[in-house]
Amino acid sequence: MDRMVLEAKIRPPLTRGELNQLRREGKVPAVIYGRGKDTQSLLVDGRLLGKVLSMGGTNVLIDLQIENGAGSNQETVMLKEIQRHLWQPDYLLHVDFIRISMEDEIEVEVPLNFVGEAAGTAEGGITQILLREVSVKCLPVNIPEIFEVDLSSLEIGDSISAGSLTLPEGVTLLTGPEETLVQVLVPEEEEEEEEEEELLEVEGEGEEAAPEGEEKEVQPDEEEARK
């Protein structure tokens, strides 16, 4: 996986109003933590951070160049959490960076890219995507960008599970292998017809069977003969 460089500055304690003013100026408040070191408050350029996200996604490896007044130091990090504006997703409010070691395995979420069209859709089948990412464990350098999932061979009733993904060497799947990623469902009309047929069969069986404990009707002549 490619590594990208991003500059940051140490952020002094600021009021909420001062932070909002910095956001309006294109700066994004951030923190960096992990690996037993102190948490640091930072400021990063929102435009450059957006560029990093657009080119590398959330699993990108970042060499964070931190200016501290007396020089700068470099930390290798990944994005842990991103807070976005509710109505303006491109407007970043805050980011968390986590320090990583290139020698230690980490757990990450890798997005799924579904390609092709399920063969069953030609017969009215409905493609249902259940998972859009899976969890894996690997060294930072081995993090996959995406997993492609080919839908073209899926007929009605077929599905693809996480265990069928082809993993690169050094990558371990953490998502349960039995977890369904995508399936092709029976058309809704056919399901409704099958339910109606089952209901009619049940009702028919109920009409043919006499209610348990029902007594035979006795005719008047038979009643007289018994006396």
Image (tube, rainbow, N blue to C red):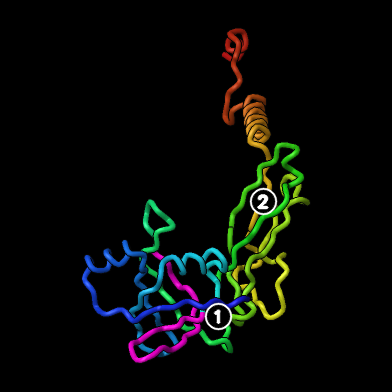
The quadrant of the picture occupied by the C terminus is: top right
- Residue at position x 40%, y 53% from top? 88
How crowded is the residue under tag 1: few (<14 C-alpha within 10 Å), some, or many (20+)? Answer: some
Q: Type of residue at label 1?
A: Ile
x then y, percent, for residue 131: 59, 58
- Residue at position x 60%, y 73% from top? 136
First to last magenta residue range: 63-83
Name the mark nearer the viewer: 2 or 1.
Answer: 1
The secondary structure that dominates the magenta segment is strand
In terms of sequence position, does the residue under pointer 2 or pointer 1 come before the other? 1
Q: Residue 106 shows which numbered tag?
A: 1
| Residue 202 is a magenta residue | no
Q: Residue 31 shows which numbered tag?
A: none
Q: Type of residue at label 2?
A: Gln
Instruction: Determine whether 120 is above or below 174 in the image.
Output: above
Question: Would residue 181 appear left or right of 97 to someone viewing this image?
Answer: right
Q: Residue 183 shows which numbered tag?
A: 2
Whether residue 209 is visible = no
x then y, percent, for residue 141: 62, 81
- Secondary element under disc 1, as helix, strand or loop, is strand
